[in-house]
Image: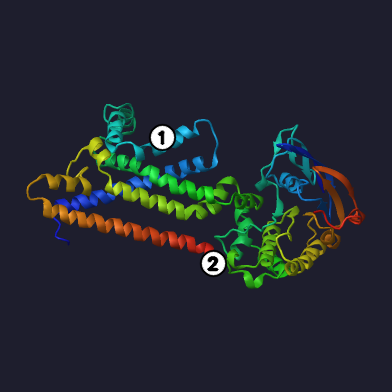
Amino acid sequence: MFGLSPAEWIAVELSLRIAIVATVVALPFGIAIGWVLARKEFWGKTLLDGIVYLPLVLPPVVTGYLLLISFGRRGPIGAFLADYLGIVFSFRWTGAALSCGIMGFPLMVRPIRLALEAIDRRLEDAGATLGASPLRVFLTITFPLALPGIIAGAVLCFARALGEFGATITFVSNIPGETQTISAAIYSLLQVPDGEAAAGRLVIIAVVIALAALIASEWFARRAGMRFQGE
Amino acid sequence: MLDVNVEKTLGTFSVTARFEASAGVTALFGPSGAGKTTVVNMIAGLLTPDRGSIRLDKMVMFDADAKINLPPYRRGIGYVFQEGRLFPHLSVRQNLDYGRRMSGQPHDTDEFARIVALLDIGPLLDRRPRLLSGGERQRVAIGRALLTRPRLLLLDEPLASLDVGHKREILPHLIRLRDEAKVPMVYVSHIAAELRLIATKVARLEAGRVTAVGDLDLLKDVDAFA
């Protein structure tokens, strides 16, 4: 299909896997951080806010380098995770998912935070007087009301993860079959004399995936929003 | 029997409230800004008093000295808010059923049918709150609070957001509630005419202080606080 070679298919499949894993793993953290930023006042909140948005403003190469020295084999966090939990990031697709998740994180947190800030807190109070514990209030009122924002955040993170290049190639390099995503594959193909046709095919695939993600998110958000409008 | 004796300072405004409410409808009567909502929020547990205690049927809801402060979801107190506060993502039926779901009680179809009939909300069950009129919304809110089988029902200006026609639509239901459901109620309002129809006892609140507690005679000299 699309005249892709097996190697190119591997890049497509790898890109999707990395972006999906990055988004799914980042989502609980994104909701938690978004909730903390929307609801809590504490010392150091500005700092946390800044750290969350840092990947958005830092050059991706810098983010990738910081990941390399902290999550690499010899990095303090990387060595700990490898020795005690057997989780290795460096030069693995899991590392690509980590860098993609971190690059997409600010884009995920922002709509989630805005959605949580927009919720009428008095509805949560009403839930409490009806016998719902704080956790149940969150699950039955806060979460469903914030769902359009959560979906938007997830889709933005997914799209960013799919296109991530700078941080990923710095952190886990460009290894075919392991860390070579669509973006990295296009980059490699453009370095060789007759790679342009293959690069063009991958470009088309990238456009199709991005459009599909946008349309899917529109559809989900509209469905979630429709529940408030009545049937 | 509700026994309230609380103090609370919010910025430059302070509330000192001391009164009792037993069976029937206790009116909490006073002008806007007198601290009526502050008092009911403390009874519900949405606001923590600085000092004092709140007891309901000998059960301590709050006691500053003993450091007891039951969270709202464990107080068993129903609350009907001024604006209804129905959950927009749930149908009317799901709104009514919310309290039961949260407490994990089994379905009681008889009780559900009784409340639905009492408030005449049967035709609304499958609608979304957005599509209800103000009066319908408020009746559903009352039903939702009643279906948690509260030991006490707080009503904070339940008619304030309604026009005259819808007020007339709700009041008979509230009077029936008082006479049939036997749930003690604390009814907040600044309109004496409304309270004359529903209240059995009056506590007057002015500038954060309970200035008088007594029977309906307390409503005589004032028509309405602004």
The chosen color scheme is rainbow
- Give the percent coordinates (x, y) of residue B146: 71, 59
Up-down: is A77 above or below B149?
Answer: above
Taking the spot 62% from the left edge, 51% from the top edge, the residue there is A122
Q: Amino acid at mark 2?
A: Gly
Taking the spot 59% from the left edge, 62% from the top edge, the residue there is B94
Up-down: is A213 above or below B54?
Answer: below
In the image, B130: left or right of B41? left
Say which of marks 1 and 2 sits in front: 1
Residue A27 in sight in this render = no
Asked if badge 1 and badge 2 are on a common chain, one would say: yes
Q: Which one is earlier in the sequence, the residue at label 1 or at label 2? A: 1
Up-down: is A51 above or below B155?
Answer: above
A68 or A152, which is in the foreground?
A152
Question: Circle 1 is placed at which residue position?
Answer: A51
**What whole-number distance in Å separates the C-alpha atoms at marks 1 and 2?**
40 Å
Taking the spot 71% from the left edge, 65% from the top edge, the residue there is B115
Q: Amino acid at mark 1?
A: Ile
Q: Residue furthest left?
A: A193
B123 or B70, which is in the foreground?
B123
Question: Circle 2 is placed at which residue position?
Answer: A230
Q: Residues within 10 Å of mark 1 (few under 14, many from 20)?
A: few
Up-down: is A187 above or below B166?
Answer: above
- Give the percent coordinates (x, y) of residue B209: 82, 42
Q: Secondary structure at mark 1?
A: helix
- Give the percent coordinates (x, y) of residue A115: 49, 50
